[in-house]
Amino acid sequence: MTDTRIQKKGDSFEQDQFLTILSREDALARFEAALFPRAIASEGRSLADALGQALATDIVSLIDVPPFDRSNVDGFALRSADLALAGEATPIRFVLNDEIIACGTAPVQIVSSGTATSIATGGPVPRGADAIAMVEHTQPVGERAIEIRRTASPGQFVSYAGSDIARGETLLRAGTVIGSREIGMLAACGIAEVSVARRPRVAVISTGDELVQPGLPLRPAAIYDTNGAIVTAAIRENGGEPVFLGAIPDVESELEATMREALDSCDMLVLSGGTSKGTGDVSHRIIARLGEPGIIAHGVALKPGKPLCLAVCDGKPVVILPGFPTSAMFTFHDMIVPVLRRMASLPSRADAKVAAKVPVRIASEIGRTEFVMVSLVEGADGLIAYPSGKGSGAITSFAQADGFLRINALANQISAGTETEVTLFTPHVRVPDLVIVGSHCTGLDLVTAPLARASLAVRSISIGSLGGLAAARRGECDLAPIHLLDEATETYNAPFLVDGLELIPGWRRMQGIVFRADDTRFEGMNAQEAVRAALADPTCIMVNRNQGAGTRILIDRLLGAARPDGYWNQPRSHNAVAAAVAQKRADWGMTIAPVAHAARLGFIPLAEEHYDFALVTARKQRPAVQAFLASLASDESRVALTRAGFRPA
């Protein structure tokens, strides 16, 4: 501590040196402790006007996207089983149905075996069809028939209902910055207006008798006001709404009046100059009269930037930057930007390019430069770039990715384990604190909500239970949600764990048969009876689930060796199953009770499955993992899960 008075001959002034020099960490910690937590002011904005602002509330989708199974290409909707024997020497002939499905056209005719329906990209897949053959892979045979010489897999070129966004899914969390990708996602769900964090109004004042505004003549001994322009621009690019009040001379009464006016109308006040405690530097003396607690730090161990003054006056931050432009901007970006961005609910800044390892082989087509969107997660030895896999038509692939990597036109793949450079979509991308890879459930949103409120970034990648277990074994995630039934032991999940993984109980979900409420074929039956009735009716079409899904195991146990019509229709989510039944593309399937009730469908309970978490033991002590485990066990989450139709373990 220093208490030195300097007397200048012929003058009567005294200069007090800085009383306490704080470290950068201490100064910032004290500043933030005096400001936060605080309520974030919000306002409603149309999508067009919300660009660059942070969401004030979570956004939940009220619809499935796409809302129906749709074609990804121009071609023909057909049954993949009809092409099982197709080859160059064995073309398969299809009779064309008397309708053409365009975008916005609801199908009428059923696609029966041996027939195909012409369909445009984006057109709804008709009942009976489970794949699309590209028009380029077909040959006309007369006016009403085509030939195809290659096989098709179930689901080929089909985007299933809800495969991009599931009804009830949390689209975007509070704090997410709205960019063009997020606007596209919201528009796809029919959302026209959102509640966003209001941009903090930040008053900017330059101080000094010597300052002249750019564009005016420069008088002797004067300098142009550089800081006013720089600080104003920096505030705008970091989420604030700057209000430049000009350069004020070192007249205490005039400066105090301007500062009071600024604090009355704005959320924050930034001054430059007048902080070194010379006779002409009066800003810091005025602050003591503007509100409590006043000055938090005056003098910080920075080079440049030692004269920085941080204050809080009745809840509003007041900052006095050093007068030299280099010092002013160094301290602004290092010390003030974190606070400003937090007030605007914006994430921290990050570099534009990062090195990362690709965990799985990514195939590519030779002759075309390919850009693969990736999500970044933290691995054992650095960043891992996990490729997005929802397809080219999925809005979320673009909106939820952190960046992209490039595959050269002469390469046919990127091998697993390759180190590559990821170009970020925005310099503000933040690597998630918690990574969850595996089976998706809307209950996850309820448990991770408290983490988001605590400013922990959570990344959830839905690839199914088996895919999640593989990712956990490779150390690419913290937790893998799973619901796998071991038929040998009739137990869930535990038999599938390996060394290095431990089971964390989650919640119970009732699985059952779903059907339209007005379908009398299933009235009064249990699940086994309902399946037998469906198998006995050749007109009754099922909708299945994808291989690797826990639900698929239950379905196959019920069916035994039977492969009814619709068996090869294999969407990847519970919502897609419900959509297929509700929209009469199928008559029955298997899903969980909360999804069935949300879709207003009939539901026959079958079995309560265990939705648990395979935890990577080596990552158990990470703060975000501990926060998740605490949230999972909390009364708040248990009540929320119960209300949503789940039973906490």
Image (cartoon, helix red, strand yellow):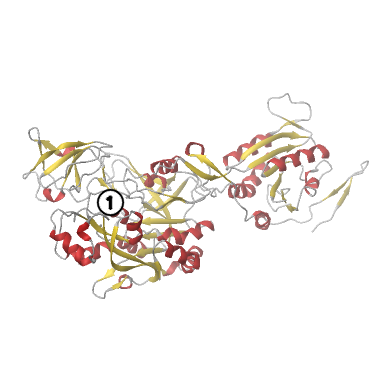
| Viewer-proximal residue among 6 and 428 | 428
- Residue at image position (32%, 40%) is 369
Q: Quadrant of the N terminus?
A: bottom right
Horizontal side, residue 43 vs residue 375: left or right: right
* Residue, far top: 217
Asked if one can make out residue 51 in the rendered structure from this viewpoint, the answer is no
Q: Position of residue 578 (x, y in %)?
A: 29, 54
| In the rendered image, the vertical position of residue 299 relative to residue 76, given as above or below | below
Residue 167 image offset from top left, x and y in percent: 37, 51
Q: Residue reaching furthest bottom?
A: 489
Above or below residue 530? Residue 312 is above
Residue annotated with mark 1:
582
Q: Residues within 10 Å of mark 1 (few under 14, many from 20)?
A: many
- For the residue pair 155 and 605, the one nearer the viewer reads as 605
Q: Is residue 147 above or below residue 169?
A: above
The residue nearer to you, when weighing 559 against 367, is 559
> Camera-side residue: 320 or 555?
555
Whether 28 is drawn above or below 627: the answer is: above
Q: Secondary structure at mark 1?
A: helix
Q: Amino acid at mark 1?
A: Ala
Q: Quadrant of residue 443?
A: bottom left
User: Where residue 624 sits in the image (x, y, percent)?
Assistant: 49, 62
Quarter of the figure that contains the C terminus: bottom left
Q: Residue furthest left?
A: 89
- Please state if 286 lies on the left or on the right of 444 as rendered: right
Q: How many marks?
A: 1
Q: Report if residue 35 is visible in the image.
A: yes
| Rendering coords of residue 146 (x, y %) | 10, 38
